[in-house]
Image: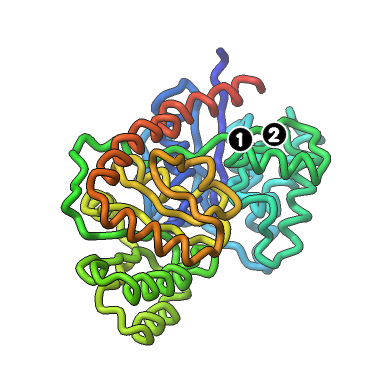
Amino acid sequence: MQAHKIAFYIGDFTRSGGTERACTSIVNSLASQTSNKVYLIVTNSIEEKPFFSINSDVTILYLNSKYSLGKYLTLIYRLNNVIKSNNIEVVVAVEVFSLLFILPIILISKLTRKKTKLIVWEHFNFTVDLGKNLRRKFRWLAGRFADAIIVLTKRDVVLWKSNLKINGKILAINNPSSFAVSKKEYNKESINIVAIGRLTYQKGFDRLIEIWYEFLEKYSNGKNWKLQIIGSGEDKEMLDNLIVKYNLNNVEMVSNTSSISDYYENASFLAMTSRFEGLPMTLIEAQSFGLPIIAYDCLTGPSEVITQKSGFLIEDNNKEEFVEKLQFLISNDALRSEMSEVAKEEMKRFSEIEITQQWKELIETF
């Protein structure tokens, strides 16, 4: 098959979120596992360093212009220049808001040169707009102008098709795990429960702290365990105050770290209480390390990762059931070990090789 020049526009590569992690993983694997020439377009300057490691096979194109209203035209001008000068054939708008910059260039390409193909890669589920009407408008534009739209779950494909007219392709491609399946044996002696993500409303760590408080009030064996909440974000002070309010001495707040694998390796299982998701990477990563999972069944993602053999999917906002399943898992070493083995097996469908192949097949259709 003919090799393509494909560029991913991610904006700021110093950010440490799940979108940036997934993008870096796909960019690295496409560059190393296929014959395509892969570029990463960033608003950063060459002096800045990415949060996640980027392979030497990937060509980074620096725009040296962070977005502000006054620099909007400058950013589009520089973005158009790097796409045109490098003869980019396929542009991936990472997250639908990137269309603010990418779409004008795609429309220009129709008039001035061979059309550049557009893929929109959305990381939020369709029901989430974070209070921004623009997100809904950009989704409409994606349906109208994108050659392909990638969402993270099959459930989201249905939501897009039910609510918008889609002129191009739309398909679900899961994000890959950033980690290979761990070869270490599951540590059933561990007393650490991990919860990982940005400290923001979406992730619902306030709900988890309240659940943990109710669990400790009901079951004395929980006092020997530790809940580790790992991440950084705007809700840090609020969460700290909740911990003080409930006098929770066995909750540890850990700032965002590039050594997250150390925490996965030393955990007993993972808890997730998000209010909404796209496809929560922390669930997939946890399975890579053989961790059982307890998670709320929020839109979207958990139900497409967790099975009855690898964890517990809890009705959203059902605190009582969450507390009971915490107790059940904590009290059952054998069950945790069984779930660990299943989790590693189930994770294979999210392997980098499997997901990269799906991207490769899509690109080859252009």
In the image, farthest residue toward the left: 189
Q: Nearer the viewer, residue 4 or 268?
A: 268
Amino acid at dot 2: Ile
Compared to 222, does 187 lie above or below? Answer: above
On the rendered structure, is 203 left or right of 79?
Answer: left
Q: Nearer the viewer, residue 102 or 131?
A: 131
Q: Which residue is mark 1?
A: 172
> Could you tell me which residue is drawn at 71 percent across and 65 percent down?
132
Task: State the image coordinates of residue 139 (x, y, percent, origin top left).
Answer: 74, 49
Q: Quadrant of residue 161?
A: top right
**Gap between marks 2 and 1, in whole Å?**
7 Å
Disc 1 crowd rating (10 Å Cα; few below 14, some 14-19, many 20+) is: some
Q: Is residue 76 visible?
A: no
Task: State the image coordinates of residue 111 (x, y, percent, origin top left).
Answer: 82, 35
Q: Are marks 2 and 1 in contact (CB under 8 Å)?
A: no
Q: Is residue 223 visible?
A: yes
Q: Nearer the viewer, residue 68 or 338?
A: 338
Q: Nearer the viewer, residue 20 or 213?
A: 213
Disc 2 crowd rating (10 Å Cα; few below 14, some 14-19, many 20+) is: many
> Could you tell me which residue is drawn at 34 percent across and 63 percent down?
230
Q: Quadrant of residue 87?
A: top right
Element at label 2 = strand
Q: Quadrant of residue 255?
A: bottom left
Task: State the image coordinates of residue 225 (x, y, percent, origin top left).
Answer: 23, 65
Element at label 1 = strand
On the rendered structure, is 96 left or right of 59?
Answer: right
Q: Which mark is drawn over residue 170?
A: 2
Amino acid at dot 1: Ala
